[in-house]
């Protein structure tokens, strides 16, 4: 059934502090497995992130095993890091009021998590953080979510969508496809959102907020009206 509005919510650095998780993992790797193993892992991690466009902790472990395994005890110990990741207390890394925002948006439409990620840790992250329960299991995980909007609309048909994401590149790509049927909201959280070189190189979102918690104080349907009003003013000028 088609609803009036669906709120699409990213996970990492939008609802969940992904940068903080990386910081904790860096400390853990260095203290538990040594500088050399940690440096190898992060080199592979960065290469894989560039290739995929999202963070893949477990994929980097697998590639580490394939690329540098020599049978040493240190290398085998590093593989035990998968347990640390799968059992990580992701609920402790939710941004303040993240769950409150989901509950608030649910009063105006349907909330859906739309995130990039792998098929193991990303769902685990949503489960252990409480995000999956908060959206009643409505979650879509893709390699490149901006390329999957046809599937998104099939799963959750709506007259209008609002996308909340910390990456302007993603918001701009989705806007180019859905156009006036999409309102983009940019929370300035995480290293992508706070890097001035990245921000200046991308098109601005429809709305910018400093923190995800601000959405708990807003009427999200009013943002759609403001977007329409802005479009009308622009057309009148031109």
Image: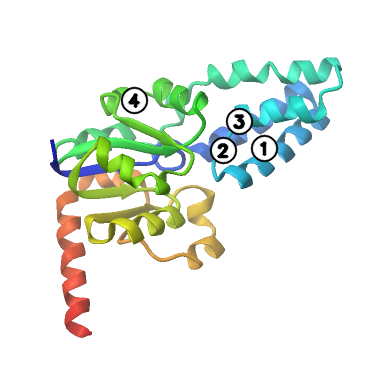
Q: CA distance from mark 2 to mark 1?
A: 8 Å
- Asked whether the beta carbons under mark 2 and mark 1 sit within 8 Å of each other, the answer is yes
Which residue is pictured at 39% across the width and 59% down the height? 172
- Residue 45's label in the rendered image is 1
Mark 4 and mark 3 lie on one chain; the one further toward the N terminus is 3
77 horizontally vs 54: left or right? right
Query: Is residue 177 toward the left or the right of residue 89 in the image?
Result: left
What distance separates the C-alpha of mark 1 from that of mark 4? 26 Å
The image quarter in which residue 58 lies: top right
Q: Residue at x 30, y 24 (%)?
A: 137
Give the mark, 2 or 4, whose residue is nearer the N terminus: 2
**Labels 1 & 3 near each other (Cβ < 8 A):** yes
Residue under numbered circle 4? 132
Label disc, if present, on residue 55 of the rendered structure: 2
Residue 213 x/y as whole percent: 31, 43
Graded by Cα atoms within 10 Å as few (under 14), some (14 to 19) or many (20 or more), the crowding at tag 4 reads: some
Which is nearer the N-term, disc 1 or disc 3? 1
* Callout 2 crowding tier (Cα within 10 Å): few <14, some 14–19, many ≥20: many
Which residue bears the numbered disc 3? 57
Of the numbered discs 2 and 1, the one sitting upstream in the chain is: 1
**Disc nearer the start of the sequence (1/4):** 1
Looking at the rendered structure, the number of numbered marks drawn on it comes to 4
Q: Disc 3 versus disc 2: distance between alpha carbons?
A: 6 Å
């Amino acid at each position: 059934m088609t609803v009036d509005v669906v709120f699409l919510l990213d996970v990492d650095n939008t609802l969940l502090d992904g940068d903080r998780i990386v910081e904790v993992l860096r400390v853990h790797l260095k203290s538990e497995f040594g500088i050399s193993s940690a440096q190898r892992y992060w080199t592979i991690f960065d290469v894989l992130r560039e290739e995929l466009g999202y963070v893949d902790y477990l994929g980097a472990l697998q590639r580490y095993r394939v690329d540098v395994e020599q049978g040493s005890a240190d290398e085998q110990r590093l593989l035990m890091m998968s347990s640390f990741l799968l059992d990580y207390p992701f609920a402790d890394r939710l941004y303040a009021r993240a769950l409150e925002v989901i509950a608030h948006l649910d009063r105006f439409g349907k909330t859906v998590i739309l995130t990039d990620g792998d098929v193991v840790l990303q769902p685990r992250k949503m489960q252990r953080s409480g995000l999956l329960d908060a959206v009643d299991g409505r979650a879509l995980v893709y390699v490149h979510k901006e390329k999957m909007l046809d599937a998104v609309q099939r799963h959750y048909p709506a007259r209008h969508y609002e996308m909340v994401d910390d990456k302007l590149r993603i918001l701009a790509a989705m806007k180019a496809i859905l156009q006036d049927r999409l309102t983009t909201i940019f929370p300035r959280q995480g290293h992508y959102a706070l890097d001035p070189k990245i921000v200046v190189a991308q098109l601005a979102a429809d709305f910018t907020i400093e923190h995800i918690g601000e959405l708990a104080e807003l009427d999200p349907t009013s943002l759609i009206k403001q977007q329409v009003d802005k479009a009308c003013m622009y057309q009148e000028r031109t």
